[in-house]
Each structure stands twice: as structure tokens, then as C-alpha cells.
Image (spheres, helix red, strand yellow):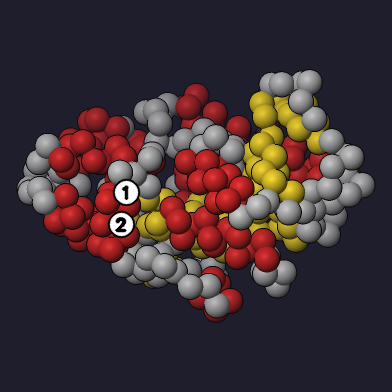
Amino acid sequence: MNILISGASGLIGTALTRYFEQGGHRVIPLRRGVSAEPFSWQPDQGEINLDNSVTLDAVINLAGPGVADKRWSAGRKQEILGARVQATRLLSEELARREQQPSVFLSASAIGFYGPRDDQAVDEGTESGSGFLAEVARQWEQATAAAEAAGIRTVHTRFGIVLSAEGGALKRMLLPFRLGLGGVIGSGRQYMSWVDVGDAVRAMEFLIRDSDLSGPVNIVAPRPVDNREFTRTLGRVLHRPALIPMPAFQARLLFGEMAEEILLTGVKVLPTRLAEAGFHFDKPELENALTLLLARQ
């Protein structure tokens, strides 16, 4: 297959590129700001170039700034929302205009769609929740409308916390936990719906190949855990105590509004559609996933 990926240099994009290339497929990165490239774009300027002479079998859209990379301000929130929506809409509209269209368009979304839910289990049939991240996910998914209207099978991949020792949330946790400074955040009862990066990549390939799947699909392991269990498990795998908590007030002081939606609340998400379609998770249990990830470091 020829697979076009936007955001190919990110955590998931890098893992996908390595996986697909090892499988003999050609990965084409959609590069930013390189107008001479046959596949390039500048989303903030509404410019995109997709070489029509090259057949595209699948397109994967992962573009967008990290929601937890910087403290939220009004400007940062607009950047997070605007960049995702603008880039996705531009790519979607160009795919719809293209004479040769891909058979599938996988466009990233996130489990933030459901909003904070305490311990209520949710799946793809659950309505969207409240909060900034839910609004981002709603508009992000709506931005694929042109591709869907053109008859391109479109899947909204709602990612949970993707665990990888090479980046993302887990990598940021490793140093404090290895120093014995890890601990429960807030009440510890907030759910963390996670997925091993290898399972996330395999799920993406599964979605490309299963022509019956479209619309929202949760990319999360089948056994989410709360923050307290996650903390205990990571400490056990690292053979370190995890006894230093971060009280809610401290999280709010350090991270501001972002703390409420990312650290102090959570959502218990189930991968119902993947399970019903017959996808098998290699690492459904957190301890096994963390052990194998950290053993490869």
C-alpha cells in the first residue's frame, strides 16, 4: 500500500511509519512548509499539494499540537483547536477533490470527546461530554465532513493515553518515578484509559483493512485503570516506591486549567467497536504492557 501520513514525525506517526515500512508498505509523509515536495502543506495558509500521479491507498491524519505540551491560556487553547480543525478540514477537502481517492481516511481524535465521567464506562455509542477537550474532539471530527460526503470511508480514531517509552505521557513520568518521587494525583480515583503503542499501531492497520468500520473507534486497551492503580503498577514495574502524592491544589497551581481536564478527572473508555470487529490486543493488561515497554529501553 501507499500510505500518506500527516504528523508522521510524532509519537504515533513514527511508530506507524516504522511498522508499515517493515511490512513492505510505502509511507509518504505529508511535510509542512516544503512547497517543492510532491506531498506538502501549510495548513495555516490553506495550502496543500497532493501529487495526483501517485495512488494513495490510505491516508492517516495525525496533525496537531500536543494538548499537554504547554500551560493553557486563551491563546494556547485557540491554537490547539484551530490547528486541528483547520488542518483536518484542508486535508479532507483536498481528498474529496482528488480524482484518485484513497479507500480509507483515518483521522485522529481523542477520548476527550466523552468529557470527564468519573467511573462511568463509556464507548462509541456514548454522547459527547463537557469541557474544552470534548469541544476540540467534536470539531476535529466534524472537520472530515468533505471526505465523508465524497464517499471516502472515514474513521475517527479516538486515542486514549498511548504508552511508549519513547515519548508521550509515560516518558514524562519515568524520571520522577525512577527517583522515587512518583505518586497518586489528586484523589487517585480518576480513570486512565490507556493503550500500548504497539497495539495502537496494529489497531490502525486493522481499521485500514476492515472495510466495514467507519465513524468513531476507540483506540484504548480493554482494561482501563484508575490513577491509583496506574501509580502502584508503574512503581512496582520500576521497583521504586510511589508514595509522594500530588494533591489537587498543587496540580492546579502547577498546571492551571489544564489540570482539571487532564490530571484530576478521567474517563473509563471501552474499545467496543474494535472488540466486536474481532481485534485482538496483545497487551490488554497494564503491568504486562509496562514491563515489556520498559524492558526494551
The residue shown at (58%, 44%) is 17
The residue shown at (53%, 72%) is 279
Q: Is residue 141 visible?
A: no
Q: Secondary structure at mark 2?
A: helix
Q: Is residue 110 visible?
A: yes
Quadrant hosting residue 64: top right
Tell me where residue 252 appears, x and y as whole percent. 25, 36
In the image, residue 199 sits, relative to residue 14, either above or below, namely below
Quadrant hosting residue 220: bottom left
Quarter of the picture holding the N terminus = bottom right
Q: Say left or right for 154 vs 184.
A: right
Q: Say left or right for 114 vs 44.
A: left
Q: Looking at the image, which is closer to me, 171 or 160?
A: 171
The residue shown at (89%, 40%) is 53
Q: Looking at the image, which is closer to me, 260 or 175?
A: 175
Label 1 amino acid?
Arg
Query: Label 2 belongs to which residue?
Result: 292
Q: Say left or right for 14 vs 258.
A: right
In the image, which disc is placed on residue 78?
A: none
User: Is label 2 in contact with label 1 (beta carbons under 8 Å)?
Assistant: yes
Tell me where residue 238 appears, x and y as whole percent. 16, 50
Tell me where residue 194 appears, x and y as whole percent. 37, 57
Q: Looking at the image, which is closer to me, 112 or 292?
A: 292
Q: Spatial distance from mark 2 to mark 1, Cα to Cα?
A: 6 Å
Quarter of the picture holding the C terminus = top left
Label 2 amino acid?
Leu
The residue shown at (37%, 68%) is 284
In the image, residue 273 sits, relative to residue 178, either above or below, namely below
In the image, which disc is placed on residue 296?
A: 1
Q: Check disc 1: other Cα within 10 Å, few if <14, some if 14-19, many if 20+.
A: few
Tell me where residue 59 appears, x and y as whole percent. 71, 49
